[in-house]
Amino acid sequence: MKYSRQRELVREAVEKSSIHPTADEVYQEVRKREPTISLATVYRNLNQLSENHLIRRVVVPGDSDHFDHTLKEHEHMICTQCGCVVDIWPQVSLQALFSGMEGAHITGYDLTLYGICDDCARKRGEAELQDTAHV
Amino acid sequence: MKYSRQRELVREAVEKSSIHPTADEVYQEVRKREPTISLATVYRNLNQLSENHLIRRVVVPGDSDHFDHTLKEHEHMICTQCGCVVDIWPQVSLQALFSGMEGAHITGYDLTLYGICDDCARKRGEAELQDTAHV
DNA sequence: CTATGTGCAAAGGGTTTGCAAGTAG
DNA sequence: CTACTTGCAAACCCTTTGCACATAG
C-alpha cells in the first residue's frame, strides 16, 4: 500500500471517531478537510484498511457496515432504541468458545448483539418516573 | 394473515429444503409449481412468515438472507470454502450467555460462524494425500 | 363488501467498478 | 517509468414499493 493523502485522512477519521462510523459518516468527516474526495475513494480505502487489519469492519445486519479503530477482541451491541453502537468486553474469549465447539471446524465469526444502551435505559427510567408522578 | 396459495407454497418450500435457501432459491423452487408467482411475492411472504415466527431468517453478512424452517435455538456456520450453511448446536445457550454479560442489557443477537464444512474438510484431506502421494 | 394478497415494473440504498487522469516511489 | 490511486458516473445486487387487479373471509 503506497501512501495517499486520502487514505491517511480516512484512517484518521476512523481513528478519532468514537461512534463506529459508517462509510458515509467517514466521508462527511473527511470532506471537511478534503472537499473533493469521492465516496468511492472512501469505500476503497475502508476496504483496504480493514483487509490489512488497520481498522475493523463492524457488520450490522440490515444496516451499512460500521468501522472501528479498536483492534483488540471485543463485541458490539446495537441499541434497539437509538441505533448507536456500544463496545462490549466479554469476560471470556468468544473466539476460543466458538472454535472449541464440536460439530465443525469453526475459524471465525460475526456477532451483533442487540439491547438497550445506558443512555436509553436512563431515559426510559425517567419516563417511567414521569408516568407515575401524577398518579 | 389470511390464507394464500402463494404463501403456503413459500412456506412449504422452506419447510422441505435442507439448504437454508435464499429468497431467490425459494422463488426458483416455488415457480415449478406456480410459474406465475413473482419474486416480490416471495419476498413479502418470507418477511411475513419470519415476522410471525413460522420460519427463521438467517442473516449472512455480505450475502442474501437465508431462511430456515428449524425454530429451535441453534446457530449457523458458513463454509468459507463452498459457502454452504451448516447447523451448529451449541452445548450451552448463547442467548443465556450473552444476556448474562455485564455492561449493558443484551436482549438478542445475530451470530454467523465461519469454518470448513465436513465435505470440504474431507476433500481437502484427500487433496493433501494426492499432494504427498508422488513425493 | 373490504381488508389482504398478487404481479408487474420501477424505485431504492448501499456498495462496487470501468475509465481516463493523477501521483508515489 | 509504472504500478497504484483518484474522481466521476454508471452499474450492480438484493430488496422494497406503488399501483391496479384479484381473492379470502
Image (cartoon, coloured by chain):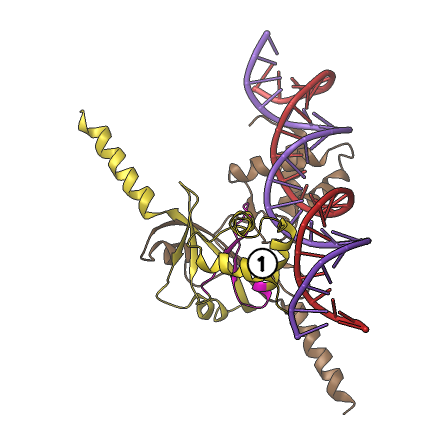
Chain colours: A yellow, B brown, C purple, D red
How far from the left and from the top, in percent, is residue B8?
A: 64, 34
State which quadrant residue B24 falls in.
top right
> What's the residue at 34%, 66% (across, down)?
A91
**Seen in the image, is B27 located left or right of residue A135?**
right
Give x and y (percent) for residue A116: 36, 46
Residue B111 versus residue A3 in the image, above or below: above
Along the horizontal axis of the image, is A98 left or right of B47? Answer: left
Q: Is residue A59 found inside the magenta-colored segment of the image?
A: yes
Quarter of the figure with the C terminus of chain A: top left
Q: Nearer the viewer, residue A126 or A109?
A: A126
Question: Which residue is the site of mark 1?
Answer: A46
Question: x, y percentage for residue B52?
Answer: 51, 36
Q: Residue at x 73, y 78 (%)?
A: B127
Residue at (42% x, 47% y) in the render: A84
Q: Quadrant of residue B118?
A: bottom right
**C7 relative to B114, above or below:** above
Residue A7 seen anywhere in this rendered image of the structure:
yes
Q: Is residue A42 above or below residue B79?
A: above
User: Residue A7 location in percent, x, y?
Assistant: 59, 61
Q: Is residue B69 left or right of residue C6?
A: left
Q: Going 33% across and 56% down the picture, which residue do you hit?
A: B100
User: How many numbered marks are there?
Assistant: 1
Secondary structure category for the residue under label 1: helix
The chain containing the residue under callout 1 comes to A
Residue positioned most to the bottom: B135
Asked if residue B18 shows in the view, the reply is no
Amino acid, disc 1: Leu
In the rendered structure, the answer to whether residue A85 lies left or right of residue B7 reads left
- In the picture, residue A81 is in which quadrant? top left
What's the magenta region? A49-70
Q: Quadrant of the N terminus of chain A?
A: bottom right
Q: Residues within 10 Å of mark 1 (few under 14, many from 20)?
A: many
